[in-house]
Image: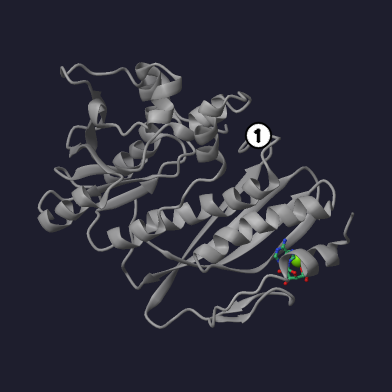
Amino acid sequence: MALSEFEIIQQIFQQHKFDRQDVRLGIGDDAAVVEVPEGHELAISMDTLIEDVHFPKDMKPKDIGYRALAVNLSDLAAMGAEPAWVTLALTIPEANESWLKAFASGFFGLADQYNVQLIGGDTTRGKLSITVQVHGLLPKGNRLSRSGAQVGDQIYVTGTLGDAAAGLRFWNEPDHSFSWLKKRLARPTPQTELGIGLRSFATSAIDISDGLVTDLGHILSASNVGASVNLEALPLSLALCGVVEFEKAREFALAGGDDYELCFTVPAKELKQIECLKHAGQISYIGEIEAAPGLRCLDRDGSELDIAGLAGYQHF
Ligand code: ADP
Ligand code: MG
């Protein structure tokens, strides 16, 4: 059934109950009003998802709703911010109630998990496009950024890399062996708790949306340093290694985007924290920050892999 704009807002987006005390005014007025707690600053980030550019046309609406919020929470995680509020600009070709309900259930499912409240947005007609803006809280002056990596720092990544890119490549393969990889594309897990935990000792962080080579490259240029990465240490999933040759898996891990894992740097002198990272599970030490500019990806025998042709996704 088709809904009017007012019905979409009221029946789909205003229905969901949140209980954040810091929202003075949520959906329904001309603007939302929120209270930033004493001693905190706001971290604000926005991401747009466009059909056929950021997700395949036949991705389930529930997954689209989940993913639109997840990729934004991932940006806050990379800043070490605690998510609080979110706004949603939704452009849809038609007001299809069952599509909207499924979209909202994916979106709200994740929002509830992280206690982030939808406080407003905009609803328009057009080619499917979803813009989400998240607002997160940081203790004053205490944030992660791309620009603090120092020579000698250790480089870490969370989870496994290359899965989502493989999920996209094999999106139309019906075989069960691809389903986990496709799920990694459809439902990335934002590394929120880890980002908050890293705030006190990591020197830099970024979330991997465009591939390790590209995103670690952003840390290196923002920090004015270089790095060596040990190819043998790249975390690869069994699912990925099960469907492509090892060399190809490594390529997905280096150049494939959409995993939304974190890459971060830690000073080698932070012995206690490094010991904790070793035991945290799902965190891999992959290399070191160096003075010589550029990124070197080294094999076991010390030979360097040519990464020039491996750049991540670029829109323009
Ligand atoms: P206005 O015309 O004053 O801009 P709108 O009719 O666009 O108001 O929106 C009415 C209320 O509904 C506002 O509070 C707005 O933030 C909220 N809203 C509109 N679309 C969405 C959406 N997709 N998700 C959440 N809130 C929305
Ligand atoms: Mg409006």
Q: How crowded is mark 1: few (under 14 residues within 10 Å), some or many (20 or more)?
A: some
Quarter holding the C terminus is top right
- Seen at 24% across and 47% down, the residue is 265
Residue 2 appears in the rendering: yes
Q: Name the residue under label 1.
A: 56
Identity, as a three-letter code, of the amino acid under mark 1: Pro
97 to 11, vertically: above or below: above
**Image point (84%, 66%), residue name:** 7
Percent position of residue 303, x then y: 20, 16
Residue 147 seen anywhere in this rendered image of the structure: no
Depth check, front residue: 293 or 247: 247
> Residue 206 placed where, x, y %?
37, 47
Q: In which quarter of the image is the N terminus?
A: bottom right
Question: Of helix, strand and loop, which one carries label 1?
Answer: loop
Task: Decide which of 178, 306 is in the foreground and name it.
Answer: 178
* Left or right for 141, reference 86: left
- Residue 26, given in percent of the width and then of the height, sits at 66, 76
Q: Position of residue 44 (x, y in %)?
A: 50, 62
Whether 160 is drawn above or below 99: the answer is above
Which color scheme did the rendering employ for the protein? one colour
Q: Assign ligand 1 to one image quadrant.
A: bottom right
The residue drawn where x is 16% and y is 19% is: 302
